[in-house]
Amino acid sequence: MSNQNYEKYWKLTLEYTDFNEQSFLKTLEIVVDRIDYLNRNNSYVYKSKDYQKLQDDVLEKIPKSASRKDQLASTRKAINQCIKLGFVNPELQSYHLLTKEYLSAKSNRKRETLFSKIVYSNSKFNRSTKKGTDGNQINFLIKTLEEVGVLTKKDVYALMLIDIENYHRDYATKDELEIKRIEADKIGFLNRKYNQYSYLINVLGKLEEIVFVRKSNKDFELYFEEDAKRIYGEDLEEESKRRDPYLHLLYKKELYEESEEKFNNKRICFLEKLEYPVLIASHIKPFIQSDETEAYDPNNGLLLSRTIDSLFDLKYISFTDEGKMIFSKRISDDVKEFWKDYHLEPTILNDQRKNYLAFHRNLMTSIDKILN
């Protein structure tokens, strides 16, 4: 067996996997109350005896039917969970600004939003009560998702092998993921660390605007919800048309080539004329409504920034045959005022693209009639 350093992976363990559960909420409340007490004079220095007292408090108020040794292990895991997920900072010094709001939230729905904010901004799986770190794994994963567009099951556990505290940037590229996938499979990482992987999947499943699209009982793809709906339709539970990855890459490549030909730049938003690090190959006639030819026809596409793509995809804006931007009745006046002078260049408005734009305008008009 290869001599691998198994210490360099994302070490997440959870005592509670339901973050609305009373046992988790009560544990978090006890920890917060203890921090408030210890820091009442704003001069607290961590002492082991204070952590011991905190353990005793949690044990007393949340009794468990287990041996004393197992009770202590569960209690330590529960306290560390509050730290790893970002609700509480190491050495009982402080807690996240939203933690008390999370505890007092009137609904699970509100807590879900607060959970996403706290975990994204402050979770650090490799830290503990007495150990701080700089690496935020969830933040790294989401920025990687933004970079590559979709993460497979293999991508997710491959990410767990990246030492983000010493990484050269705050996300991984497709090529870097491929290297880590090979490494993970070579050392049998998923089988060895399946519990930690399962905990990570559990946390990802609680984040808002992130969705799993099941490919089979054992496989999935992870998307931003908006992107998944664009590909699979509004109802992600229904069997929907699947995008061919290779044909989609060729479709996007042709748009890049058009950008280079028309604007002397491969990565420019067709509308804003700005070079963004990430551009969306946005379908004019929605992918879900396109036949096989239309789905991968570059004339049925525009390279757009994420902001413009969102407005265009949701039919808040469209364009005339001359490239002038037109607006849905559902959009606010301040947005109209901001974008009113932007337009598509006539050089990209060939007859095929005009036909697709006519379809898009009709969709926007139909939605406005229904919703207004």
Image (tube, grey):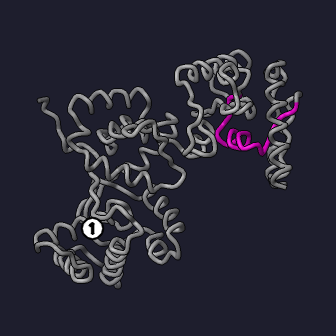
Q: Is residue 178 left or right of residue 77?
A: right
State the residue at coordinates (38%, 70%): 21
355 up-or-down from 366: above or below: above
x, y percent for residue 8: 23, 42
Q: Quadrant of residue 90?
A: bottom left
252 up-or-down from 172: above or below: above
State the residue at coordinates (85%, 51%): 329
Q: Quadrant of residue 39?
A: bottom left
Determine if the magenta segment contains residue 124.
Answer: no
Q: Is residue 348 left or right of residue 8?
A: right
x, y percent for residue 55: 21, 76
> Can residue 352 be seen in this snapshot?
yes
x, y percent for residue 34: 31, 80
State the residue at coordinates (63%, 39%): 230
Q: Quadrant of residue 187?
A: top left
In magenta, the rendered stretch is: 302-320
Q: Nearer the viewer, residue 370 or 300?
A: 370
Query: Dot 1 corresponds to which residue?
Result: 78
Which three-letter amino acid code belongs to the residue tagged 1? Ala
